[in-house]
Amino acid sequence: MSTEVLLEMKLNSTHVPTLERSTGRARLIVDGSPFLVRGVELHNSSSSSPEAFRNGLESALTVGANTVLAPVSWETVEPTEGTFELAQVTHLIESARGVGLRLIILWFGAWKNGASTYAPAWVKRDWTRFTRCVLEDGRLTDTLSPFTEEPLDATAFAALMRHVEMIDGEQRTVLMVQVENEVGLLGAPRDHSHPANAAFTKPVPQPVVDALANRPREALGANITVWPEVLPSPDRSDEAFMAYGIATHIERVAHAGRQHSALPLFVNTWLDSDIDVDLPGFAVAGGQRPGIYPSGGPLPHVADIWQACAPSIDLLAPDFYFGDSRTIFGNYVAASKGLFIPEMRRDITGVGHIFEAIGEFGALGVSPFGVDSGSAEDLQALADAYDLLARADHLLSDTVYSAGQQRGFFLTDQQPQIDLVFSTVRMTVTRMTAIGTDPIGTCAYGIIRQLGSNEFAAIGRGFKIAFTAIDGESNIGMESVQEISGVADARPGRLLNGDETAGGTTWIHPHNEPMSTAVFPIPMGHMHTGISICRIYPYPRMSPQLV
């Protein structure tokens, strides 16, 4: 059988992972079933040597991940123009498969974090052939211009995807591939190189015009067929132009890879959130003007341009460290009809956002960054979170996701309480602390899923729930609370009552650490699997005999 025929068979294989959107939000389907990515993204250089990658895999296993996200770079795949070296890719796939992990490849090609440091030396040294972006004042950057006629990394990406299919088409260790990394231009809202300036004077391409025409009239500039006037402000018009340029090149790269593989492709985003970190001598860009954050990246406000210009990309994904999580997650669900977070915090705050993303926004996966450099203490909360999600997989995946049947939350000092409304009951969720102690400085996170008309599952730590009937005419009683400890099924643990339910009035999920007895001397138990099923029942507010 020829290589071409074999590749065609693998390309059309029903076993290829896919993104399915029948529910309105993307789910990753692997081997015919929904697959929740409990991922870890390794440090940028951790896949460049066997020893470092082995350490990364061990870290992933330690925290209970099922997927590792690892870079593959243009400079290693095509160190000499037209010559492709793919032994490293083979090693990554076989090593991940060997320890039972799935792999998501991060392609560090023409751009990584708004720069082009992963381009091979033969590209870096030839700034005449490979056009660089130019800032407003004429300074030359080391960022490759997307307006070049050169294919840049498209050929190397095609070679990568062809190789993945050839060596992994049957086992399907690789689930998805990220195309580039946090693309965009730093230093200016748009590229001022000669090819870019020439493109800026041409009419706006029709696919972009059609996409922008769907925006409200007040959100558009004076003339959507002319780049300088396409949006109300010059900076936003420049950013739209860069989004068009970068998305157009990424489509060239993605389309080249798509000829060899049907694996889902996504792009990630350096967000424009204001940064709430102030470290002397360390600049962290964010917010304000495009160019302070990478201009042209796939942010929600240019998602329509990206979708018009890069139809081979299946998902736009945020790298989330700062900002309003609920707004950002919601914006990406709306813009991309699905949520995947390929990079996020690995600490307790990141854990809270994991539960919020999966429970509230139906995320198909999450991936804290830099787990391979974390200590056991650093990773304790993440390991517990992934253990909970693994043990609750049967509760989260048996039923098709529905926004009305599943909710997620992350409670902090900024949001100490949340009301979750289901069909007949309102749940008021607050943070759980010992009697008489102040919850300030603590957090709580969880997922609540409705299993039946009066049956609910909870997964998470550090919260308590009070019930109120929606009709206002009934009280809500707790019939039973069953702790769950099973990995693959709903194997029961303790039947909770008494102190563990505040006398049968409150659904409690304590933190998995002892609670203080300094104020109230009677100890409260913190032992809890973190998963339970609560059954409730309505009963009249007034005695029937008195009505």
Image: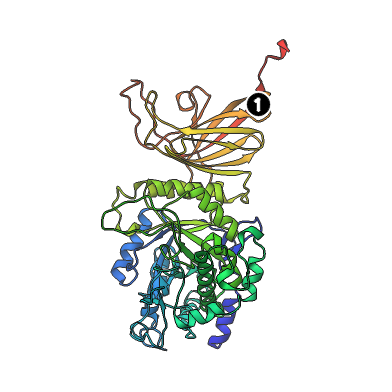
Looking at the rendered structure, the kind of residue marked 1 is: Pro
Q: Quadrant of the C terminus?
A: top right
- Give above or below for 129 relative to 450: below
Q: If the image is split into quadrants, where does the N terminus sit?
A: bottom right
Q: Nearer the viewer, residue 452 or 246?
A: 246
Residue 394 at what x, y percent from top left? 55, 48
Question: Which residue, as the protein is rendered here, is positioned at the far left?
Answer: 281
Quarter assignment of residue 344: bottom left
Please indicate, yes or no, whether residue 85 appears anywhere in the rendered image.
yes
Can you give x and y, in whole percent of width and height, for residue 245 in the image? 52, 75
Q: Position of residue 90 (x, y in %)?
A: 40, 76
Residue 426, placed above or below residue 222: above
Crowding near pointer 1: few (<14 within 10 Å), some, many (20+)? Answer: some
x and y percentages locating residue 391 in the rendered image: 48, 47
Q: Nearer the viewer, residue 154 or 461?
A: 154
Q: Which residue is mark 1?
A: 538
Q: Which of the 4 quarters of the picture holds residue 139?
A: bottom left
